[in-house]
Amino acid sequence: MKINIQGHTLQLTNAIEEYAKKKCTTLEKYFEEGITGLEVELEHKPNRAIEKQNVAQLTMAVHGGVLRAEVKNEDMYVAIDLVISKLEKQLIKFKDKLKNHKKEKVITGKTLLDQLKEIGPNENPHFPKIVKTKKFSLKPMSVEEAALQLKLIHHDFYVFKNADTNETNVMYVRSDNSLGLIEPEF
C-alpha cells in the first residue's frame, strides 16, 4: 500500500510521520489487496478557543470506491488515532457491503442493478428518483473564473471545462467554506 503523508501549515517531524505510517499500515488487515493508495493530510488550524487545532484527514482509494475521514483534536497523535479508528469502521462497513453484494449476486445470478431495473423506479423505494434533468454547454474557462461563477450562482458545485487542460472539472464548496477542485482521470 502506498502511503503519502503531507503536512499543511505544520512542520512534519519524523516522529509524527513514522507514527502516522505505522498506524496506517494497520488498515491493511481489513482490505489487504484492495487498498490502492492512502493520502494522509495533517495540519494546524487556528482556533480562538483552542491555541492550536490539529486536523488529521485520510483519503483511501480502495477497489470500488474512495473512503475519507477527518478528525480535529488538540493533540496531533490523538487526532491520528481517532481518524484511523474512524476509517477502520468505514472499511469494515465497506467490506461487509461488498460481501453481502457478492452473496446476493451469487444467490440470484443477477447484479443488484439488474434487479433494480426489473423492479423499476416506481415499485422500489431504494431506486434513486431523478426529479430534474438539466443540459448545458461547457464553456472553457480558467479555475479562477469557475470559482467566480460558483460564487455568483450560489450553488455547492460548478461543472466547467478547464481551459488549461481541456478536461471537464468540478469546483465545489468544502465544509469549511474553502473551495475544492475535482480533476477526473480517465
Image (cartoon, rainbow, N blue to C red):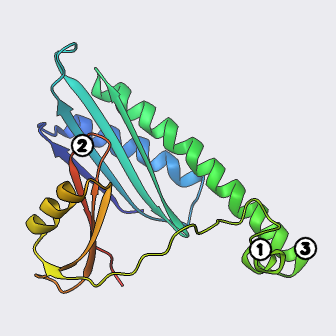
Say which amino acid is labelled 2. Asn
**Closer-to-camera residue (120/105):** 120
Q: What's the residue at 69%, 63% (across, down)?
A: 98
Q: Report crowding for label 1: few under 14, some 14 to 19, many 20 or more residues within 10 A (C-alpha).
A: some
Mark 1 touches mark 2? (CB < 8 Å): no
In the image: residue 60, left or right of residue 94: left
Residue drawn at (29%, 42%) of the image: 18
**In the rendered picture of this protein, how many numbered marks are placed on residues?**
3
Q: Position of residue 24 (x, y in %)?
A: 42, 47
Which residue type does callout 1 highlight? Answer: Leu
Please indicate whether residue 122 sits to the left or right of residue 129 in the image.
right
Q: Kindly state the secondary structure of the residue where label 2 is placed.
A: loop
Report how far apart the C-alphas of labels 3 and 1 lie in the structure.
16 Å
Mark 3 = which residue? 107
> CA separation, marks 1 and 2?
37 Å
- Quote the CA–CA distance across marks 2 and 3: 46 Å
- For residue 100, which quarter of the picture? bottom right
Disc 2 versus disc 3: nearer the observer: 2
Along the line of sight, the residue nearer the viewer: 30 or 86: 86
The residue located at (50%, 38%) in the rendering is 86
Q: Give residue 32's position: percent from left, percent from top.
A: 57, 61
**For the point 59% across and 69% down, which residue is it?**
130
Q: Are marks 2 and 3 in contact (CB under 8 Å)?
A: no
Q: Quadrant of residue 34?
A: bottom right
**Numbered circle sitting on residue 177:** 2
Label 3, secondary structure: give it. helix
Q: Which residue is mark 1?
A: 116
Residue 97, labelled with which disc?
A: none
Q: Amino acid at mark 3?
A: Ile
Q: Residues within 10 Å of mark 3 (few under 14, many from 20)?
A: few
